[in-house]
Amino acid sequence: MNIQNPSVRPLQKMFDEVPRRYDLMNRLLTFRMDERWRRKAAKLCLKDHPSHIVDICTGTGDLACHLARYNPDGARITALDFSEPMLAEACKKFNRQKLTGVEFLFGDVSELPFESESIDVICIGFGFRNLTFKNIKRDLYLSEIYRVLKQGGKLVIVETSQPKNKMIKSLYHLYLLIFVKYIGGFLSGNKKAYHYLSYSAIHYYTPDELKSLLQNNNFKSLNINNLFFGAATLTLAVK
Ligand SMILES: C[S@@+](CC[C@H](N)C(=O)[O-])C[C@H]1O[C@@H](n2cnc3c(N)ncnc32)[C@H](O)[C@@H]1O
């Protein structure tokens, strides 16, 4: 697997340096709403009795934790990421919380290690922006996700978005610019990562743009739900 592709390396390196305070920063910057949003996403994934769910860009495994906790039918759960330090943090967390039933895989979304049409659900928590925002591999990532999903399989995305209301959007951008960029950068000790988060979130897709992107990549039955006045969205797309 070529995970050393130069177009990917800067993002990979950035995430390798993030894990120490990653979870703490997420809770702080979203006033703990991020966990509620991931729980909603996990429940959406587990609906309709899937047999295999893959959490791509799993990071420190927060979404995979919710999947493992609420897995009523014993679905197979795989959690994949291309950052070893992030995966190491996820494994530690699983051990600490005595959670089982998740297989962690080191891998790149551009080359998913699964047969075509073999996966029921692919989910992604706050990683879709990384795959699609000004990323030259965007279409490759989307076609790879599409390839491994079964016909009728689901893609569940929880991601930052753009509020429709102009005043809320301005306040949200101000918060991203001051709180996330400067305070997040300072508290996390990783300025570069939080500058990137602030910049990419400010310029990221609106729900309509996200819808077009997914439709242009052959996904259908799109359902996009606003979370916290549209600061984030929970999206369901079907192959
Ligand atoms: C913002 S974090 C999200 C982590 C987690 N899903 C969450 O809900 O907090 C994005 C993660 O995506 C991973 N990532 C980014 N691009 C990737 C790729 N092409 N293949 C695999 N993992 C990738 C990064 O290493 C990082 O751990």
Image (cartoon, rainbow, N blue to C red):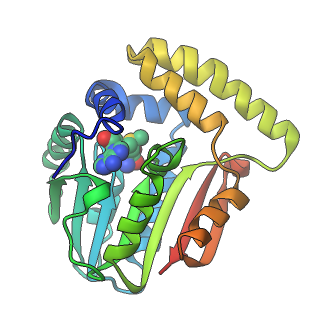
Q: Is residue 64 visible?
A: no
Q: Nearer the viewer, residue 49 or 130?
A: 130
**Left or right: 37, with 49 as reference point:** right
Q: Quadrant of ligand 1?
A: top left
How many dots with numbers?
A: 0
Q: Nearer the viewer, residue 162 or 50?
A: 162
User: Is the residue 188 above or below the residue 139 in the image?
Assistant: above
User: Is the residue 151 above or below the residue 57 in the image?
Assistant: below
Residue at 36 percent across and 38 percent down: it is 7
**Left or right: 82, with 210 as reference point:** left
Quarter where residue 211 is shown:
bottom right
Quarter where residue 86 is shown:
top left
Q: Position of residue 92 (x, y in %)?
A: 15, 41
Q: Is residue 141 visible?
A: yes
**Left or right: 159, with 141 as reference point:** right
Q: Position of residue 38 (x, y in %)?
A: 45, 55
Quarter where residue 89 is shown:
top left
Residue at 35 percent across and 75 percent down: it is 147
Q: Position of residue 230 (x, y in %)?
A: 70, 51
Residue at 32 percent across and 60 percent down: it is 55
Q: Position of residue 121 (x, y in %)?
A: 37, 74
User: Is the residue 42 above or below the residue 172 in the image?
Assistant: below
